[in-house]
Image (cartoon, helix red, strand yellow):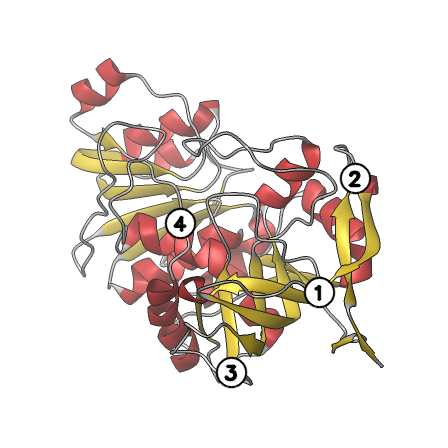
Amino acid sequence: MPSDTMRAIRLHEHGGPEVLREDRVPIPEPGPGEVLVRVHAVGVNPPDWYLRGGLTSVPGEPESTVRLPAVPGTDVSGVVEAVAPDVDDLAVGDEVFGLLRFPGFHGSAYAEYVAAPASDLARKPYGIDHVHAAGAPMAGLTAWQFLIEAGHDHPSPFQAARHRPTALDADSKVLVNGAAGGVGHFAVQLAKWKGAHVTAVASGAHEAFLRDLGADRFIDYTKSRPEELVHDVDLVLDAVGGPDSRRFLRTLKRGGAQFPVLPGDFDAEETARLGVTVSTAQVRSNGAQLAELGRLLDAGTVRVAVDSTFPLARARAAHERAARGHLQGKIVLTVEQVTAPR
């Protein structure tokens, strides 16, 4: 029966996964430059549990406007249900996927419907389903903007200089740490697409998976220290970060670069002495880049690995799975349509 309300997962207070609960809320109206998307699947990302835990502003962004109760989520795949009058490039019935309003916490994707900026969306690749498409936007664009093309001139909140990806080709050697996770498994594939020799670092359970994605060499960090085995690489993409990230500087050749996806602890004197650089970026919504990534997904050149799926109503269980770590790809929420808008 047509309705003016929909199911959505909201948090009314900050805390653990238990604060996520299903509510009925008004179906949003698309504003200027937006479309209404009937959501089929939602990708689960770290900012979702950062918001749940109490972080309400993204570094470098204006003061938070997040108000509780809030609907988390940024990654969606679904079908266009309605289009604002000023949107020309999308139509009702188009299958789309996207990273919504990032950086920021206003994606509101954990719901049956979402009002989405058309510029944040791309047409879903025909060759993959909504579940796999929903796993691609944030992780895929992060890898893309670190490795292939930043795609914007916004200054990074983490450094003064603009991040510039390293040109990769058949002569390049790349090490990806945290290679089995969301960003990591995209980074492995994009580096291979550019022809690079890729060393993947993860726990031993992920070796077959990563070799299947194209990794030329695999190192089980639970048994060996990568910095003692790898030398003279051109680029390290570290999807783990933290205080131990600087140990990978020793794997680089002079003139090489390390790209920490998450904050690390680096010493300017050490990097200068080694003759290497450290550069980071902040992923931003970009429908045009997502369309480029979509073509690789459609061709099977890049694949989305799905660690696990949960129905929307079990968002708490999805966050509990994320907290256990050691993911192989992405966690995705599936959205069974039970509400039709008037």
Please name whichever residue, 187 or 50, is drawn nearer the observer in this view of the structure. 50
| Label 2 – label 1 distance at C-alpha | 18 Å
First-in-chain label (2 vs 4): 2
Q: Residues within 10 Å of mark 4 (few under 14, many from 20)?
A: many
The secondary element bearing badge 4 is classed as: loop
Please name whichever residue, 142 or 19, is drawn nearer the observer in this view of the structure. 19
Q: Position of residue 304 (x, y in %)?
A: 51, 67
Q: Which residue is mark 4?
A: 284
Q: Position of residue 162 (x, y in %)?
A: 23, 37
Q: Is residue 16 left or right of residue 108?
A: right
Q: Are marks 2 and 1 in contact (CB under 8 Å)?
A: no
The secondary element bearing badge 1 is classed as: loop
Q: Amino acid at mark 4?
A: Arg
Q: Which residue is mark 1?
A: 27
Kindly identify the residue that appears in the image at 24 percent across and 50 percent down.
173
The secondary element bearing badge 3 is classed as: loop
Q: Which residue is mark 2?
A: 12
Please name whichever residue, 37 or 192, is drawn nearer the observer in this view of the structure. 37
- Vertical placement of residue 340 versus 23, above or below: below
* Residue 94 circle label: 3
First-in-chain label (1 vs 4): 1
First-in-chain label (1 vs 3): 1
| Label 2 – label 4 distance at C-alpha | 27 Å
Q: Are marks 3 and 2 in contact (CB under 8 Å)?
A: no
Quarter of the figure with the N terminus: bottom right
Q: Amino acid at mark 2?
A: His
